[in-house]
Image (cartoon, rainbow, N blue to C red):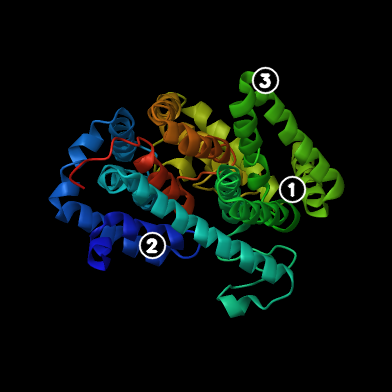
Amino acid sequence: MKADLLRRPAFWLALSAFFLPIKPAPVNLFLLVAVVLVLGQSEYRGHIVQALRRPDVTWLCVFTLDLLATYAMPDTDQAAYLDFVHKYGRFLLVPLLVPALYRNEDRGMVLRAFLSSMGLTLLLSWLIWAGANPAWFGVHADSEYGIPANPTVYKLHITQNFFMVIAIFYWLQAALDLKDTKPAWSVVYGLVVVFALINVFGMVQGRTGWIVFAVIPVVFFARRMGLKGLIAGLVFSVAVLALSYLFVGNVHERIDKGVSEVLALYHGGQTDTSMGERYTYMLAGWSAFLDSPWIGHGVGGVVKAVSAFSLQRGVEPFANPHNQFLLILIQSGLVGLFAYLLLLGLQFRQAMQSEIGARYIVPLMGMYVIGNALNSFHYDFAESMLFIYMTAAVGLPPEPSNV
């Protein structure tokens, strides 16, 4: 039995998923083992071509190769291009991972590994908030991170809160699924959800997670009430954020700070804070897009394209505008954005073809759509890898009889 488990690529993907919120080196190592096992075993290797016939996977590969083909564009900086090759090139792993995630038990094993790691992150975050020494857990603390005022663990607050909201969705789903069959476990998962919500809104300073949280009530309300539920879920999400602003100091402080930073920049002031920088990134990125609106400046041309505007505003030229949609507009223009939106649409259609996909994958896709409007998650390692695992599992094809 143990030997069979070690031959299953999903086992190594699960180990990779466990380390995703912790450290990149083990993620890459275990991912490599999984890919080697897929390529080395005919019962898995034989399904790679089948995976490539999935419309979303086919289009993902076309979209990726099109992005990488922009090397010849005049604004390309070779070092920046190679950096993005490394990041966007990960998409090409998807057809190699689809065969490893054919079975529900394999997909479940990978998901449970990720949630276990997020449970560990939640526990350690609470301990740091309570005053425990972060060094006990191998956490590097400085004046901003890994401290009681912002108890991040192994990732920055953007990643930790985004991942924690994803975990909240699955833990809440588990609590609801088990309320009749295993009520004790349902209570346990419910308590974990409560502690995770307090962590996201009351402790960690990750504004992205607060916005992405809106997906959860929208999903659960819509399932029960249809279109009315969708509207009710949006209203509920706005109410949660409003109440958090009124009564939770962490939320109140971060929102007020962000608004004041944007207002200062709008009136010609200077700021070097994160929200002020993002505002400048948005203006500089939009200016670069208008210079070449149809085909963009290439994946390696972002820095050159934004340099004039950003330097005028006192911000160093950047390669990442912290908005995936804007980043694609700069790199490949409206053509590229259309291709990316088509990819998301194909993924959504593929997931909706099965009950499991609609129930467990579509909400995660919604979180990525919102998150990518606030960050460039295909530029960031952990978020990019989770997107790849999601894409590999999104089709939920019939279980092959010979695996």
Q: Earlier in the sequence, mark 2 or mark 1?
A: 2
Secondary structure state at the residue bearing disc 1 = loop
Please give the count of numbered marks on the rendered protein: 3
- Residue linked to disc 3: 228
Please identify the residue farthest to the top as the structure is shown.
Answer: 227
Disc 2 versus disc 1: nearer the observer: 2
Whole-number angstrom distance, CA of label 2 to CA of label 3: 40 Å
Measuring from the top left, give residue 136's x and y in whole percent: 60, 80
Please identify the residue farthest to the left as the structure is shown.
Answer: 42
Q: Are marks 2 and 3 in contact (CB under 8 Å)?
A: no
Measuring from the top left, give residue 253's x and y in whole percent: 81, 51
Instruction: Answer yes or no: is residue 81 visible.
Output: no
Whole-number angstrom distance, CA of label 1 to CA of label 3: 44 Å
Whole-number angstrom distance, CA of label 2 to CA of label 1: 45 Å
Instruction: Answer yes or no: is residue 136 visible.
Output: yes
The disc label shown at residue 15, or none? 2
In depth, the one of 347 and 103 nearer the eye is 103
Measuring from the top left, give residue 157's x and y in whole percent: 62, 56
Residue 263 picture quarter: top right
Measuring from the top left, give residue 270's x and y in whole percent: 74, 48
The disc label shown at residue 51, or none? none
Residue 120 picture quarter: bottom right
In depth, the one of 177 and 324 nearer the eye is 177
Residue at the (67%, 51%) spot, across then down: 274
Q: Amino acid at mark 2?
A: Leu
- Residue linked to disc 1: 270
Establish if 50 lies above or below 256.
above
User: Dot 1, how many residues are within 10 Å of its Cα: few (below 14), some (14-19), or many (20+)?
Assistant: some
